[in-house]
Image: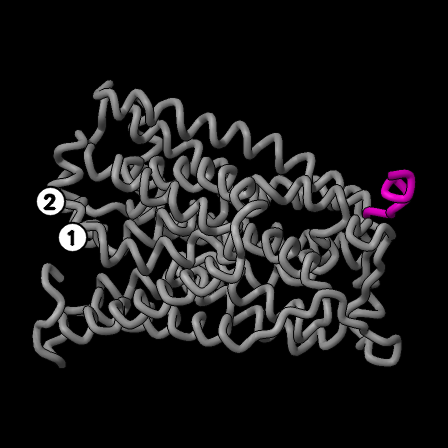
Amino acid sequence: MAEERKIQVDEMGLIFGKTMIIFTVIGVVMMVIPAIFYFLGVRPYIPLAEVSKYWTGSAAEFWQQVKGFQVHGYGWIFHNLGYMDTLSMLGVLLLMITPLISMVAAIFRAPSLIYRILLFLGAAEFLLSVFLKTK
Amino acid sequence: MEWSIILFVFTLLIGIISPVSGVGGGVLFVPLSTIIFPFHVDFIRGAGLVMAVTSALSSVPYLTRIGLANIRIFALLAPVMVITSVVGGIIGLKVTSAFPGGKYYIEIMLGAIILLVFAVMMLSKRLEFPQVRDEEVDGWSRALGLRGEWFEPSLGRIVRFQVKNTPLALVVFALIGFVAGMFGLGAGWANVPVLNMLMGAPIKVATATSMLIITANAPAIGIYLTKGAILPSVVIPAVLGITIGARIGAKVAEIIKPVFVRWLVLAILFLAGFMNVLKGLQGLGIIPHIIPGA
């Protein structure tokens, strides 16, 4: 056990991991709690019965049949946060950006400039891909 | 509601099998769900991706702390895999929505990928402690200091490692990211052999670093979210089932014979791959209707 304590782990890895566990726990809680209310029938944006009626179609067909429009972007989540099913999607959003937050945190403990650049590049691409998808 | 309960039980079972067999949950969930459940493949891929990423996010912090998940390798691969997994997700959804019968093309490609996973698992040999000599270490690996160490209880000592073939591995990981994003599979089945056999990372490091790499597929979740392809009634039971199941599976792994489970999983993968290809060909009218209910 004494030797186990002697292993050298990068500081950037440690901060990456610590950040990740904090945001993962928050994300899972934010995803699961509203979903439980949703399954109990509390304030659904799309009632469960409607979901199971149309989920055989593609995502585009599903939204067309259930709501009469197709979904493009994150607006359907942010404009409907009063509903439990869409509220639980906030948790999924947080889980999605948790690696991004962890990468940003790790930049400050990177062992060299090249790792700062690599992590910054990864984080920038991550952010860009999230932004691009909303178009 | 009853489908959500069945889905929970189903993913619970997958979660139990996963740690015992060494196969990631996503790779079993996606192909089997397309056969068993009535949901469209868009929702299954979305749920598969959230499952794979959530599982990885839960385990990475511990694996990083004990030195098994290597952040240096991740930092190099992330810029490549973020892009390719997003492109894969976009193309996957385009195929199903832009072409008549797009769903069937996806099923055929998914089946082919699963059969490839089957072949990789059948043929690959796991190298527990591969030796990478100093002269084998490539310039990238040397410049970036792609090495690490962990305490190995079975040996009672610290094991140090370094990696090789970094440029070639980058190209392979770009392809893996694309496939992971397109099919919502997670990518442990491909990451591990590349890290282990191509780069020479010890199997424990390869497995743990693979979990870290899977987190780079997280942006592809956005592709599914922005198209409304992630539904709580599919995602929540699946994530809860796999999470609880994996904890049970970790205990079961201590008492069950892994060889038996490995062969069971191989048989399931082969069947799932084969069935997906058949369903796709059947949907396109290339072969007669032979799978009932599909």
- Residues in magenta, as a range: A1-9
Q: Is the C-beta separation of discs 2 and 1 under 8 Å?
A: yes
- What is the number of callouts on the image? 2
Q: Chain of mark 2?
A: A
- Numbered tag placed on residue A65 in the rendering: 2
Kind of residue indicated by mark 1: Gly
x and y, in percent, of residue B275 in the image: 25, 68
Give the side of residue B159 with respect to residue B178, left or right: right
**Residue A97: x and y, percent?**
53, 42
Majority secondary structure of the magenta segment? Answer: loop
* Pointer 1 residue: A57
Q: Nearer the viewer, residue B154 or B65?
A: B154
Mark 2 crowdedness (10 Å alpha carbons): few <14, some 14-19, many ≥20? some
Q: Quadrant of residue B73?
A: bottom right
Which amino acid does the dot numbered 2 rest on?
Answer: Gln
Report the Cα–Cα distance between label 2 and label 1.
9 Å
Q: Residue A132: in sight, yes or no?
A: no
Q: What numbered label is drawn on residue B9? A: none
For the residue pair B12 and A25, the one nearer the viewer reads as: B12
Chain letter behind tag 1: A
Asked which secondary structure carries label 1, the reply is loop
Residue at (62% x, 50% y) in the render: A123
Mark 1: few/some/many CA within 10 Å (<14, 14-19, 20+): some
Say if the magenta span includes residue A5: yes
User: In the rendered view, would you say A50 is above or below B262?
Assistant: above
